[in-house]
Amino acid sequence: MSALNPAFERVTTERLLLRAVRDSDLEVIYRLHADPETSRFDATGALSSMDEARDLLARWLGDWARDGVGYWMVERRDAPGVVVGLGGVRHKEIEGRRVLNLAYRFAPEAWGQGYATEVARAALDLAAKHLSDIPLVAIISPANGPSLRVARRLGLRLERAISYMGSDNGLYVVDAPQDTQSPGRTPPT
């Protein structure tokens, strides 16, 4: 078993505290994933039971134990202990390829404040620094305008359409850093 990766375990951004999931997060995971609004674009739909939330939490705790990284619970720095969402990266297999899946989900009262961008930027930066050998992707429904805007703002590009969990989605990718000497290439900012 891997230990938690200290670079990922607890991260602070300008406004947020990002921390590894823990057993005590069961209730907030259920609330975030049982809400039809926060699950509108989720191919699996809203959670319908606490047992489903328990399974999700067990999977995420397993990610941290096995891989040393996983999704974070997101708290505002000015309100420690109050979870407003989750996000980050976790190892996943998509179409037979091991990738880092970038995801973010916030309670409706936290929408429109730029938190998804802030969390995703932190995850992208850490992944580029510590896990650069693993492709980073985001699976986004074409109807999920806010998530598409976050991905594009951070430089992810649509690689192709895919069917994921029975739904049509876009597979967004982070391009590898480009050689600054290559003609016509601009290094990522």
Image (tube, grey):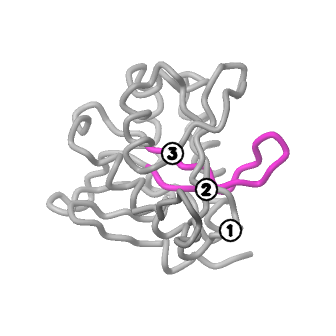
At which x and y percent is residue 109? 22, 34
**Vertical arrangement, residue 80 with respect to residue 45, above or below:** below
The numbered disc on residue 103 is 3
At which x and y percent is residue 24? 44, 56
Amino acid type, callout 1: Asp
- Per the rendered image, the range of residues in magenta is 87-104
Mark 3, residues whose alpha carbon is within 10 Å: few (<14), some, or many (≥20)? many
Magenta stretch, main secondary structure, is strand
In the displayed structure image, the side of residue 15 where residue 88 appears, left or right: right
What separation in Å lies between label 1 and label 2 (alpha carbons)? 8 Å
**Among all residues in the image, which is located at the extreme right?**
96
Q: Residue at x 23, y 36 (%)?
A: 112
Query: How many circles with numbers are drawn on the protein?
Result: 3
Q: Is residue 172 visible?
A: yes
The residue singled out by tag 1 in the image is 67
The residue singled out by tag 2 in the image is 90
Amino acid type, callout 2: Arg
Q: Quadrant of the C terminus?
A: bottom left
Amino acid type, callout 3: Ala
- Of the two numbered discs 1 and 2 on the same chain, state the one appearing first in sequence: 1
- Numbered disc 3: secondary structure: strand
What separation in Å lies between label 3 and label 1 (alpha carbons)? 17 Å
Q: Residue at x 69, y 63 (%)?
A: 134
Residue 96: image quadrant is top right
**Among all residues in the image, which is located at the extreme left?**
78
Disc 1 to disc 2: CB gap under 8 Å: yes
- Numbered disc 1: secondary structure: helix
Of residue 36 and residue 171, the one placed in the foreground of this image is 171
Of residue 27 and residue 182, the one placed in the foreground of this image is 182
